[in-house]
Each structure stands twice: as structure tokens, then as C-alpha cells.
Image: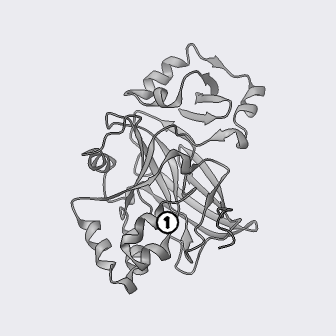
């Protein structure tokens, strides 16, 4: 089932029907056995008529599926990501850092965004004006409740300023954390069954309506399990509203590609749907 956060309320899509779910996003999703709870809600929630479904789920009505949760991310969880990070950091002498963390017992985890810096479906994400090399990173993203249990999945766009991180690994927070540096959506896919390894992740980028990048992979290529990543994240952190965790990327555009204002990034993951973001520049920094 799919849970949408919209300007008109919370919508549950289940068994080809749409239901209006009363309640606050945080308290609704932050529980164990979320799938069973939502299934029980369909017995009393108002089912939307076909004519209402379009109104509630128009592109400009869909919000990112987040309330007060933090967004974190895992790095170098795919071999291709390791290789790309090593390539970009050769001149700084930090390439071995990424090689070592890929094989290390402890994964790389870092804070990505507060909810206010997260964009949803059909909304803009920003590139940094002080970076010459900006890329999107498509990532299967976990929703983990306050008890540390994975309850759902969404699509993540982990915007990254590779020239900044490549210059010095200590610049990672600046490369990753800025206004509208993360996209989530279009929904929270809720299931009691773990996402399978054959789940496909696809990304294409369009510029002036022409496709300039396209690639795909599967979740099976990830090195670490979701429970392993979750366990490390929750070791010494409490998340009273739950947390989102981007699990890393295996789709990396070539070094000669960088995003431009107006580009359209489409990320699709089986069972979840497609997250579409347009690339923008923070208007406060356009002239810099």
C-alpha cells in the first residue's frame, strides 16, 4: 500500500482504492506493524470517489512524505559508488578513505537534511553555485520508526556537489547539506515484506526535453543489509518521530556530466513509483 502526504490530507492507496486518513503524519506512521494498522483504517476511512482522486493527488498537491523526521544517508554502499568517490578524490589524496570504508565493519553514515530542506514530487531541488560538478544520487530510502524497525520505503534524491567533496573529504557536509538538497517521494510504500534484491532502481535526466542520462540497477548490488545500516544509525541516536535513511547509490553519471538549472531528474523504483524533481538554484545565490 502507498501513503501520500498531500495539501488536502493523508491519502492511502490500497487495492486500487483511495482512502482519506485522518490524523497527523508523525503519529500515523511512527508505529510498529504500520501495514496492519493502515489496513484496519480502510474499514472506517472515507473512500474517495474516482472524481476526487485526481483532485487529491494532482502533482502540485503532493508533499514530501515527511513530518518532523530527520533524513540521514549511507555512503559507499555500492561498488560503483566507491569507485566514483575514489576517482573524484584522487587529487586530494583521499581516495583510500573510500576504499577502506567500503570494506570496513562500520558503514559511512551522515546527516542529510531536516524536513524543511526536503523537496517532494514535482518540486525543485537545488544545485550549489559554488560547485562545478553537481549530480543527483537515486537511493532507495528506508522509513524507520522510533523503535528502530523498518516500516516503509520511499525514493530518495541525494543531491551531491562532487567537486566540493572531491576537493577534501572533510567538506562532505557542505557537499551534501544545503537548501533543497534532498528529494523524497512521491509516497511512502508500506509493506511488512522487505524490499527484494531484484527491485529495480532507474534514473534518467532530461535537458530541454532531451534525455542526457539513463541507467538502471538493482538493490541486490548493495554491499550492506538494511538492518545493518539501521542498527548502526540507531546505536547512539534517538529518533522520537522516526527517521529516513537513504541507503546509497549505484547510479553515477560520468565525470564529464554536471546538472544544469532546468534539468529534470526522474527516479523510479519498482513498487514505489517515480519521483520527479526539477533542478533549480537558490534565488538568494543566483548572482554569486
Asked which quadrant contains residue 73, the reply is: bottom left
Work out whether 214 lies above or below 123: below
Work out whether 229 lies above or below 27: below
Work out whether 138 lies above or below 154: below
Q: Position of residue 59 (x, y in %)?
A: 71, 43
Residue plotted at (53% across, 77% down): 254
Asked which quadrant contains residue 112, the reply is: bottom left
Residue plotted at (27% across, 67% down): 101
Residue plotted at (32% across, 38% down): 148
Q: Is residue 267 left or right of residue 264?
A: left
Circle 1 residue: 251
Camera sees residue 264? yes
Instruction: Give the colour scheme shown.
Output: one colour
Q: Quadrant of the C terminus?
A: bottom right
Q: Residue furthest left?
A: 105
Q: Is residue 84 left or right of residue 133?
A: left
Q: Is residue 107 left or right of residue 163?
A: left
Q: Residue furthest right?
A: 51
Q: Position of residue 109 (x, y in %)?
A: 34, 57
Camera sees residue 80? no
Q: Residue furthest top?
A: 44
Give the secondary structure at mark 1: loop
Q: Position of residue 71 (x, y in %)?
A: 44, 48
Asked which quadrant contains residue 247, the reply is: bottom left
Say which of 208 and 60 sits in front: 60
Say which of 169 and 87 sits in front: 169
Amino acid at each position: 500500500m502507498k501513503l501520500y502526504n498531500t495539501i488536502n490530507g493523508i491519502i492511502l492507496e490500497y487495492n486500487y482504492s483511495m482512502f482519506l486518513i485522518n490524523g497527523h503524519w508523525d503519529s500515523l506512521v511512527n508505529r510498529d506493524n504500520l501495514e496492519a494498522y493502515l489496513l484496519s483504517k480502510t474499514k472506517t476511512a472515507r473512500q474517495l470517489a474516482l472524481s476526487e482522486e485526481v483532485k487529491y493527488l494532482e502533482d502540485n498537491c503532493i508533499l514530501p512524505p515527511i513530518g518532523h523526521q530527520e533524513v540521514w544517508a549511507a555512503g559507499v554502499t555500492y561498488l560503483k559508488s566507491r569507485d566514483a568517490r575514489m576517482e573524484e578524490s584522487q587529487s586530494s589524496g583521499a581516495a583510500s578513505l573510500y576504499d577502506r570504508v567500503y570494506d570496513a565493519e562500520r558503514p559511512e553514515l551522515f546527516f542529510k537534511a531536516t524536513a524543511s530542506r526536503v523537496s517532494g514530487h514535482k518540486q525543485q531541488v537545488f544545485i550549489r553555485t559554488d560547485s562545478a560538478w553537481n549530480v543527483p544520487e537515486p537511493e532507495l530510502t528506508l522509513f524507520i520508526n522510533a523503535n528502530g524497525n523498518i516500516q516503509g520505503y520511499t525514493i530518495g534524491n541525494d543531491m551531491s556537489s562532487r567537486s566540493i567533496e572531491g576537493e577534501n573529504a572533510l567538506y562532505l557536509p557542505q557537499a551534501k547539506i544545503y537548501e533543497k538538497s534532498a528529494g523524497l517521494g512521491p509516497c511512502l510504500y508500506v509493506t511488512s515484506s522487505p524490499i527484494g534484491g531484484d527491485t529495480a532502481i532507474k534514473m534518467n535526466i532530461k535537458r530541454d526535453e532531451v534525455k542526457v542520462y539513463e541507467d538502471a540497477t538493482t538493490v541486490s548490488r548493495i554491499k550492506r543489509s538494511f538492518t545493518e545500516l539501521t542498527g548502526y544509525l540507531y546505536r547512539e541516536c534517538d529518533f522520537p518521530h522516526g527517521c529516513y535513511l537513504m541507503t546509497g547509490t549505484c547510479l553515477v553519471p560520468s565525470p564529464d556530466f554536471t546538472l544544469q538549472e532546468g534539468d529534470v531528474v526522474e527516479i523510479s523504483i519498482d513498487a514505489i513509483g517515480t519521483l520527479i524533481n526539477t533542478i533549480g538554484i537558490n534565488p538568494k545565490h543566483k548572482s554569486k
